[in-house]
Image: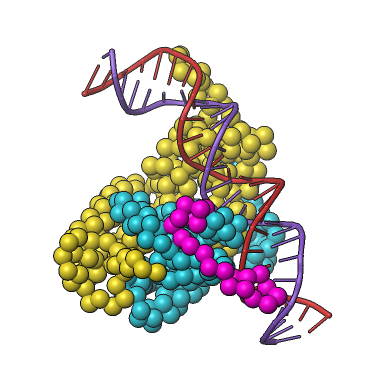
Chain colours: A cyan, B yellow, C purple, D red
Amino acid sequence: MNVRTLCLAILQAGEATGYEIRKLSSEGEYSYFVDASFGAIYPALARLEADGLVTVREEAQSGRPSRKIYSITPAGRAELVAQLSAPPAEDVFRSEFLLIAMNAPLLTRAQLAEAVNTRLSQLEAEMAHIEALAARKDNPGLAWITRYGRACIGTQIAFLKENRASLEALGRDADGGTDGGAGAGSTLPAAAE
Amino acid sequence: MNVRTLCLAILQAGEATGYEIRKLSSEGEYSYFVDASFGAIYPALARLEADGLVTVREEAQSGRPSRKIYSITPAGRAELVAQLSAPPAEDVFRSEFLLIAMNAPLLTRAQLAEAVNTRLSQLEAEMAHIEALAARKDNPGLAWITRYGRACIGTQIAFLKENRASLEALGRDADGGTDGGAGAGSTLPAAAE
DNA sequence: TAGGCCATGTAACCGGTTACATGATTAG
DNA sequence: CTAATCATGTAACCGGTTACATGGCCTA
């Protein structure tokens, strides 16, 4: 999914400026689709306008650059529907944490425990985010996906809590050294093959 | 996570050619981390060798280009461990299906049903893939992540089966009829702006 | 005999990020 | 006084994909 479609989807829900779109896509409810930067959004919006899929209305402000408020056009909505009508591409799931887990025997138990802690707190933050979204009752589609998200995140949190011990057990003992945590390069056992 | 680290992780588990690495990363057990193409893998391997993190052994073949079999070096293993020792980045989850669900009111019930079917068959294929990996008992880290994967995919399949009706109910009737929905902020293209 | 598998590699392209440029207003 | 927030935009860069080039062997 590209930034273009993301902009259309956000504008479908209501008009917005480029600045606001970035916020929604990196902190708001659209962060589950794309996290786009200014450098991607502003040009995309300009192209969308040139193509007649959105319109702009400029609102002057004292001091600041004037807000350029974008709205979707019927053509834009048609384009969005066309994009959504194609069979969905496979979900993308990429996990650095799972790569760590897969290579657990290369790491120490302490490192594994820390990785699990990091991942758990990330998941809990995400869960809190989802709960906040679920509280907003304005959009039924959003409500449905928050329930989906809650189920997925909940499963992962429960799994981690139940299985962290068996993961950590795969790690090496800390080699003699004082392991201070995220420290400098550690390590290696060496080389014997 | 970049292709470089992916190559190291794969080579850590055993020597391989560029061709084999691509297969593992797009069909095998490493597809959960990166799906890299030849155009990314071959240059990465060359750089890795220049940096002394892997070694190559060439094996001539009649007809075909000779196989270049790469092995990880102690320095490469150290680099991999260093990469894995950093706190894991947030998992990436991107779902075109969820974007469809979020915009359910824009689509017809039939379209939503089809999207759910597509997604379900993708999930079932992935589950089969995971079960196949779980059967291989050689790698304890791999075994752990297959259990994780099974829990995640299982949750999604169950959720979709239980909640597909409520999603489809958000859709419009196939064009032409009166809109059966509750009508709260319905999204039919209202031309006048 | 057509197409897929094996096996390597290069080059053009592209979608996106990062960093830069600008600058008033408000909160700590 | 500093840092963050608002607000727009450009340009250099980069990691990756797609398509190309080459070609023998095996299967349908």
Q: Is residue B185 left or right of residue A112?
A: left
Q: Is residue B107 visible?
A: yes
Q: Name the residue furthest left.
A: B177
Frontmost residue, A112 versus A157: A157
Residue interval drawn in magenta: A47-67
Q: Can residue B92 be seen in this view?
A: no
Q: In this view, does A26 lie to the left or right of D26?
A: right
> What residue do we see at 43% from left, 80% from top?
A132
Frontmost residue, A23 versus A153: A23
> What residue do we see at 30% from left, 51% from top?
A87
Q: In this view, does A95 lie above or below B42?
A: below
Q: In which quadrant of the rendered image does the C terminus of chain B lie?
A: bottom left
Q: In this view, does A116 lie above or below A61?
A: above
> What residue do we see at 42% from left, 47% from top?
B31
- Residue A58: say if magenta: yes
Residue A110: horizontal and vertical position, in percent?
57, 66
> What residue do we see at 45% from left, 55% from top?
A52
Residue B10: horizontal and vertical position, in percent?
50, 43
Frontmost residue, A177 versus B15: B15
Q: Is residue B70 above or below residue B102?
A: above
Q: Is residue B48 left or right of residue A139?
A: right
- Residue B93: say if magenta: no
